[in-house]
Image (cartoon, rainbow, N blue to C red):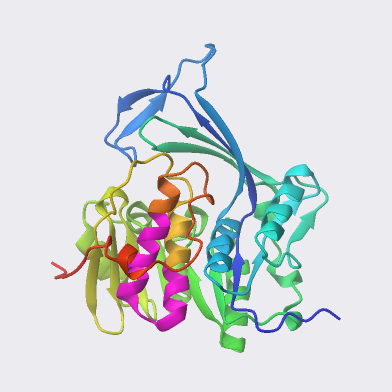
Amino acid sequence: MFWLGGLDVLTIGAGTRDVFIKSKHFERKSDPNAPAGFDACFPMGAKITLDDIYEETGGGATNAAVTFKQLGYKTACFCRVGSDSNGDAVKQALKKHGIITKFIQTDSRRQTGYAVILLSGSGHRSILVYRGAANFLDVKKCDWSKINPSWFYITSLGGNIDQLATLFSKAKTANIKIAWNPGNGELKLGLKKLNKFIQSTDLLFLNREEAALLTEKPPRHLAEIIKTISSLPRQALIITDGPNGAYVYDSVENSLLHAGAIPGKRRNTTGAGDAFGSGFTASFMQDNDLRKALCVGSLNSIGVITTMGAKVGILEKFPSARQMKRCKIKKIDLL
């Protein structure tokens, strides 16, 4: 009988095969409704020259797992892949990092999730996503009698509220803490349906656009967004804001912290949110210090942003005191 004792964290969500495609021939068009303020365009029927192509494994669950393992935690990944070469690549990449793959589900009918990331010269990207087997992760078929982690790190589950309910019920029964970075599928369910889950979440991670979607408020109304959901998580609400840094609302102390973005040349923003959230959580697991966690998350994120791929730039150990000084944090008033 397999028993996985002493597990620090189980990452839950997608495991995918990613291909990064970069071309200076993607034409930029201004668009105030686009998340980054512009669209990347190319003519249909044309043959586009690529400057670079890079393959890696991805998905929120696998990206986060690498952070936790490299920062010293016993880590397992729970995702679903196809019975194909891409699924094998996901498993092998995790095993290479020393991450436990015992609980990965293999789907004989569906292909492994796949993402094509279109990169502009500025590092901004658009992602074409095929979720495939990832959308059919079956939480109820996990043998929970063989696993009891201290933390769940939950990423996108494709909007399946029944899967969420099972995970949160397990966490409550076994006293497992939860860090949650919901995907758009979950956020589109709305705050009313997600409220009970957020109240059982220790650390809630959203980017600014996701927080706006959840609260049904314009992204520019950040103060209103924070006020609407700040008191719901048990420990903290964390909102990342791209080049504007990140905010942490301490639900216990009722205070708001802001960290400016750490300087660095953007090569690729894919995986930056996974790196930030997992780095933040890994640090918080160590000593419950939100200020320190904000720095570690920021440093992990800039490592990914300034390299190609979603895993290459992940921290290999906790930052030194000198590295931590790169992160500038201030306490601000919520207007």
**Seen in the image, is 70 located left or right of residue 140?**
left
The relative height of residue 212 versus residue 289 in the rendered view (above or below) is: above
- Camera-side residue: 71 or 65? 71
Read off the magenta span: 280-301
Quadrant in the picture for the C terminus:
bottom left
Instruction: Estimate the x, y position of residue 253 in percent, counting from the top left.
Output: 25, 84
The relative height of residue 7 versus residue 57 in the rendered view (above or below) is: below
- Camera-side residue: 326 or 199? 326
**Seen in the image, is 292 located left or right of residue 57?**
left
- The reply to whether residue 6 is visible in this rendering is yes
- The reply to whether residue 200 is visible in this rendering is no
The relative height of residue 6 versus residue 271 in the rendered view (above or below) is: below
Instruction: Estimate the x, y position of residue 88 in percent, counting from the top left.
Output: 76, 49
Q: Residue at x 31, y 77 (%)?
A: 231
**Seen in the image, is 164 located left or right of residue 267?**
right
Give the quarter of the image for residue 192.
bottom left
Q: Is residue 285 magenta?
A: yes
Q: Residue at x 46, y 15 (%)?
A: 43
Q: Is residue 60 magenta?
A: no
Give the quarter of the image for residue 139.
bottom right
Q: Residue at x 49, y 23 (%)?
A: 51
Q: Residue at x 28, y 49 (%)?
A: 263
- Camera-side residue: 305 or 187? 305
Q: How many numbered dots are placed on residues in this image?
A: 0
Main SS of residues in magenta: helix
